[in-house]
Image (tube, grey):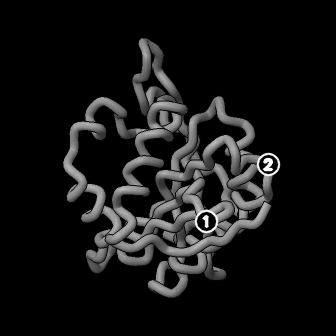
Amino acid sequence: MNHSIRQLGAAEAEAFRTLRLAALADSPEAFGGDHTEESQRPLGTFTAQLTTSAVFGVFVDGALCGLAGLFWDDGAKRRHIGNLYTVYLAPQARGTGCALPLIEAVLDHARILGRTQVHLGVGAYNTPAVRLYQKAGFEIYGTEPRALFVNGRFIDEHLMVRFLDKAPGKTEQ
């Protein structure tokens, strides 16, 4: 299976919207977004997301089959941090070996933007995703209890970080 990875542009908002909504329907417990709410948003909302953050896509045989995004705060005290979000592979892209390169593309972009660490939240139940993130160099630094409430149950999320520089994890007092 032939795949490529690149950053999505505003012209790809419809494809992004379609795959994002498929992700929310397929794995509602894995995302902070809600399918019903997001499906009612206009296309312009998705276009804006592609221009105010960086969303990368995996294309398998020319079709968008995977997503991973990076958002950030440009405030003086937090501009060193990026946040990995909306990581999803459609069923036909799973097991093809494209997940790790997709995450690495986002991390490379974070470096270009001058970020020195990237954070994410992942369902504590989602062992395959936790392993993937650990393979990408992320470490668990905490667990947020009841981070999400989905389909009548609470979901804890592991909070993970990947340091992109040699800075220590904690500062000295």
Task: Measure how far apart labels 2 and 1 are at the Cα level.
Answer: 18 Å
The residue at the far top in this view is 152
Crowding near the residue tagged with mark 2, few <14, some 14–19, many ≥20 C-alpha atoms within 10 Å: few
* Secondary structure of the residue carrying numbered label 2: loop
Crowding near the residue tagged with mark 1, few <14, some 14–19, many ≥20 C-alpha atoms within 10 Å: few
The quadrant holding residue 146 is top left
> Residue 67: image x %, image y %?
53, 57
> Residue 90: image x %, image y %?
61, 45
The residue under the point 53% across, 30% down is 156
The quadrant of the image that shows the N terminus is: bottom right
Quick check: 156 above or below 88? above
- Which amino acid does the dot numbered 2 rest on? Gly
Quick check: 124 above or below 12? above
Quick check: 94 above or below 80? above
The residue tagged 1 is 62
* Secondary structure of the residue carrying numbered label 1: loop
> Residue 87: image x %, image y %?
55, 52
Mark toward the viewer: 2 or 1: 1
The residue under the point 58% across, 59% down is 63
The residue under the point 58% across, 55% down is 66
- Which amino acid does the dot numbered 1 rest on? Gly
Is 21 left, or right, of 44 in this rendering? right
Is 87 left, or right, of 131 in this rendering? left
Is 106 left, or right, of 134 in this rendering? left
The residue under the point 34% across, 67% down is 50
> Residue 24: image x %, image y %?
45, 36
Is 2 left, or right, of 138 in this rendering? right
The residue tagged 2 is 95
Say which of 76 and 133 sits in front: 133
Look at the numbered discs 2 and 1 and tell me whether their residues touch, using CB distance below 8 Å.
Answer: no
Earlier residue among tags 2 and 1? 1
